[in-house]
Amino acid sequence: MDDSTGTGEPPIDAGAVARRVEDHRAGRGLSPEALASQAGMSPRYLQHLMEEGPGFDPGGFLRIATALGLTYRQLVEGPEDAPADTGAAADPLALRRLGIAECWERIGSRGVGRIALPDQEGPSVFPVHYAVADRTVVYRTTPEGPAAVRPGTAVSFQVDHTDDRLRQGWSVLVTGPCGWVDDADEVRALDERHAVEPFAGGDRNRWVRIRPESVSGRRVGPA
C-alpha cells in the first residue's frame, strides 16, 4: 500500500514504524494482545496495521501511539529533537471509550467511511460514501462490485477523524452482517432520502445495508 503523506513529504516507511512499535512494546513489557487491548483493537487488526502502515488507518496508529506513551509523529517519524524548554509540558494524551450515543453522533447522518471485507490474505478495505437509516449503515455500489458482498457476510465499517497535528482524534467501529436492499419501495425511499454519491460514480444501484451487532468507539485527546 502507498504510504505517502500526500503533502510532498517522503513516503512513510511502514517497516520502520512496525519495528518502532515492537521496540516500544517490548520496552514497556507489553504482549501484542495487551497492546491491542490498550489501543482498542483486536490483535489480528493490530498485526494487519503493522503490515499496511499508517496510511491505512491513521486513527488506529494514533491509538497505538497513545498506548505506547508516544505522539503520533514520534511513532511514525521516530525520535524528535528535544524541544526548547518553554516552562510548560505538553498535555498528556489519554484514550477514552465512547458511549453508543456518542458513536452514532460522530457517525452522523452521512459521510465517508471505510468498509472492511473478509479476504483470504486479510481484510480488503474500500472507502464508501454512506448514510445512516434507522441505526443501520447503507451505501451504494455496483451489483458485481467487490463491495456488494454476499448477504449475511460479517463486515466491519469504520469512521474516524484526526486533527491537523494528529494530537487528538476519534474512531468508531461498526460490525455486523450486511444484506442487499431488494424491496422496491425501500430502494425508492433510500434513493429519495439519502443523497449518497459513490466514489467511482456511474450506475451503482445496489444498496447494501449493514445491521450493527456491535458499535464501539475510542477518543484520543488531552487527559
Image: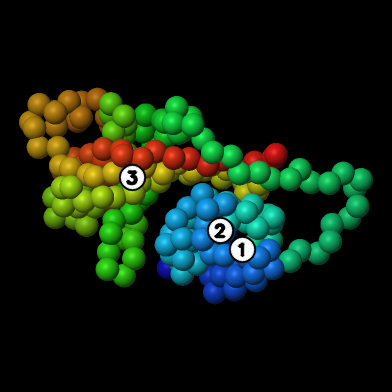
Counting other residues with Cα less than 10 Å from the Cα at mark 3, is it few (<14), some (14-19), or many (20 or more)? some
Residue nearest the viewer, comparing 88 with 120: 120
Q: Are marks 1 and 2 in contact (CB under 8 Å)?
A: yes
For marks 2 and 3 on the same chain, the one whose residue lies earlier in the sequence: 2
Mark 1 to mark 2: distance in Å?
A: 6 Å
The earlier-in-sequence mark between 1 and 3 is 1
Residue 36 % position (x, y) = 52, 57
Of 25 and 174, the residue lying toward us: 25
Numbered tag placed on residue 175 in the rendering: 3
Above or below residue 22? Residue 44 is above
Q: Amino acid at mark 1?
A: Leu
| Residue 137 shown left or right of residue 15 in the figure | left
- Residue 60 point in image, percent of width and height: 52, 53
Residue 4, percent across and down?
Answer: 52, 65
The residue tagged 2 is 34
- Crowding at label 1, few (<14), some or many (≥20) Cα neighbours within 10 Å? some
Q: What residue did someone put label 1 on?
A: 30
Q: Residue at x 36, y 33 (%)?
A: 110
